[in-house]
Image (cartoon, grey):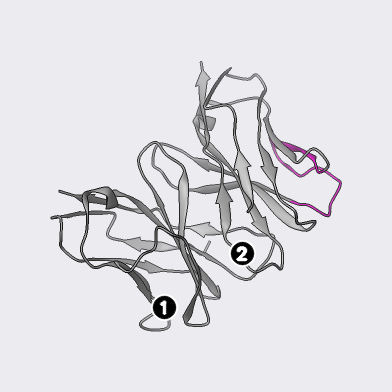
Amino acid sequence: EPEVTQTPSHQVTQMGQEVILRCVPISNHLYFYWYRQILGQKVEFLVSFYNNEISEKSEIFDDQFSVERPDGSNFTLKIRSTKLEDSAMYFCASSEARDKNGLFFGSGTQLSVL
Amino acid sequence: AQTVTQSQPEMSVQEAETVTLSCTYDTSESDYYLFWYKQPPSRQMILVIRQEAYKQQNATENRFSVNFQKAAKSFSLKISDSQLGDAAMYFCAYRDYGGATNKLIFGTGTLLAVQP
């Protein structure tokens, strides 16, 4: 069964450093998303991406965040200068279309900012 | 803006028994989708069941079923014959159909414990 793949599974970084989280969405999917979940809290929407541009972003997704689809398979989230409060599980998700099948999530990247 | 509310932070059920998790939502849209996701300790997000708002028939997937009450904006999940592997955080989620956004909006989750 196709799946969304995220790397790395864990990332430890120092405050102020740049990190790039990587995702390979399901190959025939057209919509891509990043969500984050601080431990014990709800899953929060960050950004959605379609047709090589951001289609929607939340207030969390400020100038420190960016997304990119550098080639036909990868979808990345970059945090330019990490803060302690960026520590969270980051989930990548994809969907085929605006349909009933929901989003398919990767297994997440746990980001720890020290 | 659409919101999803799960009023039960924690629930507990005996193995082989039935449990119902509650979810309410708020939207001005008439067409949308509703989902339940399971998040076990591994933190993987797993789709359990989905419901299209235009369908009156409640969705069923094996031991999982929903009670969808559109007028009341209620979408509860029933787990029958509970198993130890059902222990997880369960999130209710909403998605617009054909609107300006197609993101999923999640509730705060219900942590389900299954007692042997």
Residue identifier under label 2: B102
Q: Secondary structure at mark 1?
A: loop
Q: Residue furthest right?
A: B56
Is there a contact, CB below 8 Å, between mark 1 and mark 2? no
Measuring from the top left, give residue A89's x and y in whole percent: 34, 50
Front in this rendered view, residue B7 or B1: B1
Question: Quick one: label 2, few (<14), some, or many (20+) residues within 10 Å?
Answer: many
Measuring from the top left, give residue A1's x and y in whole percent: 53, 61
Give the CA distance from mark 1 to mark 2.
21 Å
Q: Is residue B70 above or below residue A32?
A: above
Amino acid type, label 2? Asn
Measuring from the top left, give residue A102's x and y in whole percent: 61, 58
Q: Is residue A58 left or right of residue A17?
A: right
Chain on which label 1 sits: A
Residue identifier under label 1: A73
Whether the magenta-drawn stretch holds residue B68 is answered as yes
Residue at left offset 83%, top offset 41%: B71
Query: In terms of image quadrants, where is residue A38?
Result: top left
